[in-house]
Image (cartoon, grey):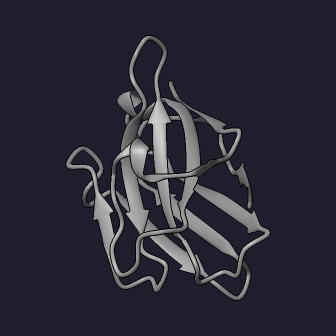
Amino acid sequence: LQLVESGGGLVQPGGSLRLSCAASGFAGDSFAIGWFRQAPGKEREGVSCISSDAIGTNYADSVKGRFTISRDNAKNTVYLQMNSLKSEDTGVYYCAADVITRGYCWLLTTAYEYWGQGTQVTVSA
C-alpha cells in the first residue's frame, strides 16, 4: 500500500486548503485513513480519521468545526478540507492507512501500518 499526500502550501490565517491522500495497492474500501500533523519540535498528533466504509469519523478537538474529512473509494482518495486555518495548524501533514480496523478509526499513530511522506502546510500572514 502506497500513500501520496498533496495539496499543502502557504495560506494566510482564515484561509482554506484541501489536502488529498491518494492510495494504491489496496482496494479503496479496505482501510481506514488518518490524517496526522507534526509541528517543529512537537510530537505527531492525530487530526482526523475516517473508517473504511466512511461511516465513522473522528476529529481532534482543535479542528472540530473547521476541518472535514471525506473519501472517494472509487478514486482511492481521502480528502481533508481545512477551513478557518490558524497559525497553530502549521506543520507537516501525513496520511496513514489502517488495514485492520473495521467500522471505526483511531486518532493514534500506533494504529496505522502505512504512512505517506507528508505535505507541508504553513499558515502565516
Who's the residue at 44% across and 82% down the image? 54
Can residue 95 be spotted in the picture? yes
Which percent across, then down, holds residue 82? 46, 54
Q: Nearer the viewer, residue 93 or 14?
A: 93
Describe residue 19's horizontal placement relative to residue 54 as left or right.
right
Give the x, y percent position of residue 113.
56, 51
Residue 84 appears anywhere in the view: no
In this rendering, the answer to whether 44 lies above or below 7 is above
Instruction: Answer left or right for 35 relative to 120.
Output: left
Q: Residue furthest left?
A: 61
- Residue at left offset 29%, top offset 64%: 58
Residue 47 location, x and y as percent?
38, 48
User: Is residue 27 placed above or below 38 in the rendered structure?
Assistant: below
**Residue visible at 35% across and 47% down?**
108
Of the 4 image quadrants, the one containing the N terminus is bottom right
For the point 42% across and 54% down, which residue is it?
A: 83
